[in-house]
């Protein structure tokens, strides 16, 4: 499910060939070796491997992290599915109240709504009881002369607020509200751990994105050179600054700090704003070059930021929500042709990122 399903199915071709009876096409030793080191087998001149490469025009990634017995277990499962296929449906539903599904964005609202609803219900109950007591008292006072002495004392008695505040019921209600508020605050605090939305650190040299990206319309890719080439967007070097500032505002005090860094051959110690945990993998090239996303999708309206801040949550739930809503940019990309055609057969909705493995744990946690 994690390593094979994106490219292979049992009885139909997806990106690669169907796997039904693959164990009859070549012997098990060959299959194990090919699954572990496909490119090595193809480059060795093996006719069958080269025919596969010529037909599908791409290398399968190495699976050398799998043990031989694990590969044999997969092939055994393929044989079982080929001989007696079972229909299995597995779909992950988003739960806005579940931190793992939504990153905790909806939890605060839910807890607040619960506390407000319970408090409102309590007020309504007390108001209704007070109203009923008032109506009954007025009704009985009309016939006050017919009431017994004991009934008259009950009718004319006054509320002892001291006793009310010391009663078990009042103490229990107040304790419940207090505990609910404490739990709400605690849960919100736990859900906000690691969330740095709004973080805007002071940089060693003042740099205005509003001026450079906004007023002068300098493309983000001009300074962040790695955004279309690899995982990291790259922090601009002082040399990039000098492409313009060797002739512009050369006497500015801020520019003197850049000149000093160049003279000392030392990098400027910019403070990182957007920082994902080490356990999460994010590739800028995949999102910007392949998916065609604009920087503003994740970084907010950079062109209006005097000081850059983290505009988005950047939580797991935030990413998952985007993968569920975003259409795959398949236009003009033949890599997705087979996927799009297969998707159209089973759904009228556009192909989403979640349909091509965008919700799989191993895509981001490697």
Image: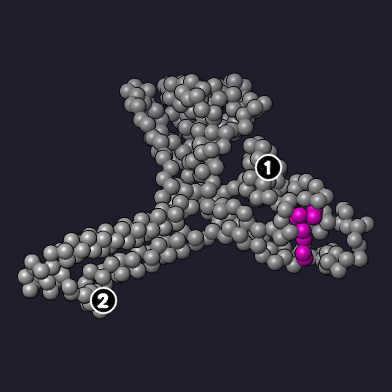
- In the rendered image, the residue lying farthest to the right is 247
* 111 vs 344: above or below: below
The quarter of the displayed image where residue 171 is located: bottom left
Residue behind mark 2: 161
Provide residue 333's location: percent of width, then percent of height.
Answer: 65, 28
Residue behind mark 1: 294
Specify how the rendered protein is coloured.
Answer: one colour
SS under mark 2: helix
Who comes first in sequence, dot 2 or dot 1?
2
Question: Does 355 appear in magenta?
Answer: no
> Which of these two is toward me, 214 or 232?
214
Q: Is residue 226 left or right of residue 248?
A: left
Q: Tag 2: Cα neighbours inside 10 Å, few (<14), some, or many (≥20)?
A: few
Q: Quadrant of the N terminus?
A: top left
Magenta stretch, residue numbers: 205-212
Provide residue 20's location: percent of width, then percent of height.
Answer: 42, 22
Residue 65 appears anywhere in the view: no
> Which of these two is toward me, 351 or 148?
148
Residue 41 appears anywhere in the view: yes
Q: Is residue 171 left or right of residue 85?
A: left
CA separation, marks 2 and 1?
64 Å
Which of the two marks, 2 or 1, is nearer to us in this view?
2
* 252 vs 94: above or below: below
Q: Is residue 176 left or right of residue 322?
A: left
* 275 vs 27: above or below: below
At 50% from the left and 33% from the top, the residue drawn is 355
């Amino acid at each position: 499910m994690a390593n094979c399903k994106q490219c292979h199915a049992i009885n139909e071709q997806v990106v690669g060939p169907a796997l039904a009876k693959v164990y009859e096409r070549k012997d098990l030793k060959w299959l194990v070796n090919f699954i572990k080191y496909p490119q090595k087998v193809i480059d060795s001149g093996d006719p069958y491997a080269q025919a596969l490469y010529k037909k599908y025009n791409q290398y399968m990634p190495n699976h050398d992290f799998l043990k031989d017995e694990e590969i044999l277990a997969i092939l055994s499962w393929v044989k079982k599915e080929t001989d007696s296929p079972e229909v299995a449906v597995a779909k992950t539903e988003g739960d806005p109240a579940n931190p793992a599904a939504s990153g905790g964005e909806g939890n605060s609202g839910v807890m607040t709504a619960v506390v407000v609803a319970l408090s409102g219900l309590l007020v309504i109950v007390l108001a209704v009881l007070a109203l009923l007591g008032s109506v009954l008292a007025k009704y009985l006072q009309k016939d006050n002369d017919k009431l017994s002495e004991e009934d008259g004392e009950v009718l004319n008695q006054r509320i002892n607020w001291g006793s009310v505040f010391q009663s078990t019921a009042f103490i229990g209600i107040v304790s419940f509200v207090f505990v609910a508020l404490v739990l709400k605050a605690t849960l919100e605090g736990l859900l906000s751990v690691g969330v740095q939305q709004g973080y805007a650190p002071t940089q060693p040299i003042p740099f205005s994105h509003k001026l450079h990206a906004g007023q002068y319309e300098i493309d983000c890719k001009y300074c962040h050179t790695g955004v279309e080439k690899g995982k990291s967007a790259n922090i601009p070097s002082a040399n990039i600054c000098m492409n313009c500032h060797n002739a512009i505002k050369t006497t500015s005090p801020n520019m003197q700090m850049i000149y000093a860094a160049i003279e000392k051959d030392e990098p400027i110690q910019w403070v990182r704003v957007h920082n994902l945990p080490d356990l999460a993998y994010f590739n800028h090239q995949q999102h910007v070059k392949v998916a065609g996303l604009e920087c503003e999708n994740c970084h907010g309206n950079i062109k209006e930021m005097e000081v850059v801040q983290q505009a988005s949550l950047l939580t797991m739930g935030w990413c998952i929500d985007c993968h569920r809503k975003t259409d795959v940019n398949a236009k003009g990309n033949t890599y997705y042709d087979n996927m799009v055609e297969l998707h159209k057969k089973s759904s009228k909705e556009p192909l989403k990122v979640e349909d091509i493995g965008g919700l799989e744990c191993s895509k981001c946690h490697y």
